[in-house]
Image (tube, helix red, strand yellow):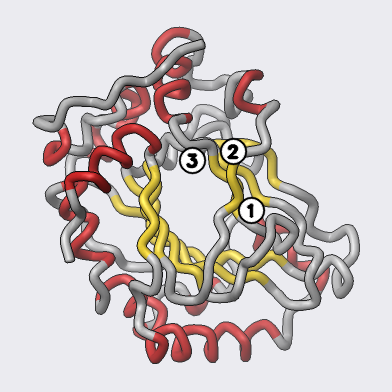
């Protein structure tokens, strides 16, 4: 089912749309079985590096992982937003490990926008994209479950900051008013799918449950994005031609 006009309006206003139960349980099971097997050999010393990039890097291009996007309506929904996309060749697997099993190894992630001023990259390097598609692979019923926290409407603030205050090479990832906010936790069940604008600031909390919190992320880019990364930071709809004909919802400014 394509995105409704209400969902498109919500995406322009909030930068986020969630579809519940979009991925079939069989596809979820195939993916989680692979990740569960890999997780059994996880070493505490490897967790910080995996947290910065991806867990189970050798699984990112596995057919059962890619099927979470390629064999679901998620791929169709991205075309409703971007029109056309570059091919998806791999996924990022993000696990928030239980604090009780790995104490102090995986602290909270601060508010950030992916691919901009990353602590593990040269601040002059941009690894941006257009749209983040996140597939929930474990139950997240509370903010204490290692949930992703996002700021609805934050893409408007980030666009203004990138346009008026930020410059390539700065190490700050978000402006102070964004950094001080907690954000909204993404709660859900296996098979739920998040569509989130690249410019939505987000953080990740600690996992206080006994079980790992698992997400698969797909980074979608409009075909023209690689040659206009800076421009896309300053114009939130540059990569979203299907939405440009839709009037932008009014954003209240305090």
Marks 2 and 1 close (CB-CB < 8 Å): yes
Quadrant where the N terminus sits is: bottom left
Q: CA distance from mark 2 to mark 1?
A: 9 Å
Q: Neighbour class for label 1 at 10 Å: few (<14), some, many (≥20)?
A: few
173 vs 97, left or right, is: left
In what element is the residue under mark 3? loop
The residue under label 1 is: 52
| Residue 188 coordinates in the image, percent (x, y) | 53, 66
**Nearer to me, 31 or 144:** 144
**Nearer to me, 34 or 176:** 176
As drawn, the label of residue 115 is 3
Give the mark nearest the N terminus, 3 or 1: 1
As drawn, the label of residue 118 is 2
Q: Residue at x 75, y 48 (%)?
A: 108
| Residue 213 coordinates in the image, percent (x, y) | 65, 70
Give the mark nearest the N terminus, 2 or 1: 1
In what element is the residue under mark 2? loop
Q: Residue at x 39, y 75 (%)?
A: 61
Marks 2 and 3 close (CB-CB < 8 Å): yes
| Residue 147 coordinates in the image, percent (x, y) | 64, 57
């Amino acid at each position: 089912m394509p995105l409704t006009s209400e969902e498109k309006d919500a995406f322009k206003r909030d930068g986020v749309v969630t579809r519940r139960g979009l991925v079939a349980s069989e596809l979820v099971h195939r993916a989680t079985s692979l990740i569960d097997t890999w997780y059994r050999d996880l070493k505490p010393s490897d967790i910080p590096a995996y947290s910065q990039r991806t867990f189970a890097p050798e699984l990112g291009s596995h057919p059962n992982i890619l099927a979470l996007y390629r064999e679901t309506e998620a791929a169709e929904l991205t075309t409703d937003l971007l029109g056309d996309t570059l091919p998806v060749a791999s996924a990022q697997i993000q696990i928030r490990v239980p604090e009780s099993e790995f104490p102090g190894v995986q602290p909270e992630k601060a508010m950030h926008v992916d691919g901009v001023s990353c602590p593990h990259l040269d601040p002059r390097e941009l690894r941006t994209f257009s749209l983040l598609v996140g597939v929930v692979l474990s139950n997240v019923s509370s903010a204490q479950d290692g949930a992703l926290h996002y700021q609805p409407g934050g893409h408007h603030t980030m666009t203004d900051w990138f346009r008026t205050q930020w410059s390539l090479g700065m190490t700050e990832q978000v402006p102070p008013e964004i950094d001080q906010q907690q954000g909204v936790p993404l709660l859900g069940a296996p098979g739920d799918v998040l569509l989130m604008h690249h410019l939505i600031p987000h953080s990740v909390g600690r996992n206080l449950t006994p079980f790992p919190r698992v997400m698969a992320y797909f980074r979608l880019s409009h075909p023209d994005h690689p040659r206009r990364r800076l421009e896309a930071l300053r114009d939130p709809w540059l990569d979203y031609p299907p939405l440009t004909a839709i009037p932008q919802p009014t954003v209240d400014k305090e």
